[in-house]
Amino acid sequence: MRMSRYFMPILKENPKEAEIVSHRLMLRAGMIRQQSQGIYSWLPLGKRVLDKVNNIIREEQNRSGAIELSMPTLQSAELWQESGRYDAYGKEMLRIKDRQERPMLYGPTNEEMVTDIFRSYVKSYKDLPLNLYHIQLKFRDEIRPRFGTMRSREFMMKDAYSFDLTREGAEHSYKKMFAAYLRTFDRLGLRAIPMRADTGPIGGDLSHEFIILADTGESEVYSHKDFVNFDIPGVDTDFDDVAGLNAIFEKWTSVYAATSEMHDEEAFNAIPQSERLSARGIEVGHIFYFGTKYSEPMGAKVQGPDGKEHNVHMGSYGIGPTRLVPAIIEASHDENGIIWPESVAPFDAIVINMKAGDGACDTACESIYAALTKGGKDVLYDDTDDRAGTKFATADLIGVPVQIIAGPRAVANGEVEVKDRKTGARETMTIDAVINKLLG
Ligand code: P5A
């Protein structure tokens, strides 16, 4: 992508409305724009990161055996009247009427809709277990939308829903998602701690929130420090292995961790003082087991091996991609801007032409840009005629992991400078060497 033809509206000034660093950096880097309170457009740079986050989420959901579908954002009120949540959900639900005066709503979550799909097709235990997910916009009319897309009214969610014949089966499904979440957050460059959590309007008696530690987080959390040393389930994890998944779950739930709603002061104080962690955190995922809370009132039954009808046991599992992007920035930035983990960086590298219009610089940059692009890399080429200082500031702000800097002096020797955004380390290399380094 040539910067001269890209749409990346960088802000020079610090936006006044931004209270936390991720919000400030997302606005300054031209990643998002607020359209009305708590409702955002994702501009091209932001959209690239969001897509990468969603792809990692999708890969790990698929690996665990979940199956993707797509459900609409608008739902009929009837389904929610069946489950009893239409009245219970309160003012957070955006209620709309269509031209026939039929009550509709912008979905805050999809338990009812997916239960309706399930009951329409699945009739036998032989078709279980089943886990259906989608990555879709939601709307919650939050009282206090704030911190940009961290807590917005319209936001994206990956929501998965599992169906099993028995509680035992449902617990295995829960553990599959638990392990998939550990892998997902790790691939996003984050260390998420699963914590016992309150179930709120979703319901049920077993629930974990996945929390990223950050000073600007909205949740108060209490845990044992040991979490930093726990192993992440490997790529070869067998999600059908009940004992194997149990072992992962037992390990990760073996030490104390709870959000303030579930906090047990006595249990926490039993941990040696030096190993206690009392901090703030960002909830990036939340999983629930709620048994037959929806299947019973909505008549989602299957025939069991005993020939009788059974209400299915369900769970639901959420991740917030539009919250994850700012959470990643909270965890990874410096005073100059964002430092993207490679897995979600909007571009793999940025080529900075320090003297656009200079024949030798242009030729060097064009050849690097062409070779890397041909090799499958996402490259941003700063071919604008901005001052070098402005270009460096922009490159640092948008956080692309590798900066390839081509100035007249180095280029005269057939060389460029390569800067690692994270460490700040600089290295002078020949043009061929930099191409090999990135493609190797
Ligand atoms: C689980 C999937 C649910 O809604 N039903 C379907 C269950 N859970 S939840 O905890 O309420 O939300 C899941 C995740 O969505 C993100 N999230 C938000 N992100 C940005 N702005 C918001 N206002 C917002 N509300 C929820 C969080 O990451 C949460 O863990």
Image (spheres, rainbow, N blue to C red):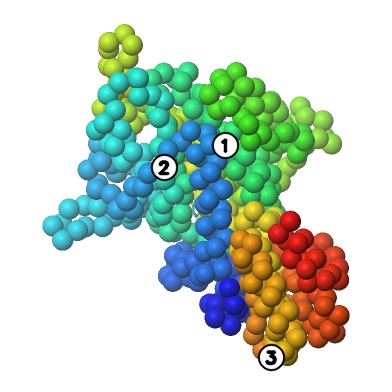
Query: Where residue 258 sits in the image (x, y, percent)?
Result: 63, 35
State the SS at label 3.
Answer: loop
In the visual, does 426 lie left or right of 204? right
Determine the CA span between mark 3 and mark 2: 48 Å
State the SS at label 1.
Answer: helix
Quarter of the image containing the N terminus?
bottom right
State the SS at label 2.
Answer: strand
Q: Amino acid at mark 3?
A: Gly
Q: Which residue is mark 3?
A: 357
Q: Amino acid at mark 1?
A: Ala
Any atom of ligand 1 within 8 Å of the CB at mark 3? no
Determine the CA span between mark 1 and mark 2: 15 Å
Classify residue 437 by image quadrant.
Answer: bottom right
Residue 291 lies, with reference to residue 108, above or below; the image says above
Question: What residue sits 67% from the left and 89% below the top?
Answer: 385
Quarter of the image containing the C terminus?
bottom right
Query: Where residue 287 sits in the image (x, y, percent)?
Result: 51, 36
Q: Which residue is mark 1?
A: 180
Mark toward the viewer: 1 or 3: 3
Determine the CA span between mark 1 and mark 3: 50 Å
Between 119 and 256, the one lying in front of the other is 119
Q: Which mark is residue 68?
A: 2
Query: Where residue 227 sits in the image (x, y, percent)?
Result: 73, 36
Residue 437 lies, with reference to residue 243, above or below; the image says below
Mark 3 closeness class: few <14, some 14–19, many ≥20 residues within 10 Å: few
Q: Amino acid at mark 2?
A: Glu
Residue 243 lies, with reference to residue 73, above or below; the image says above
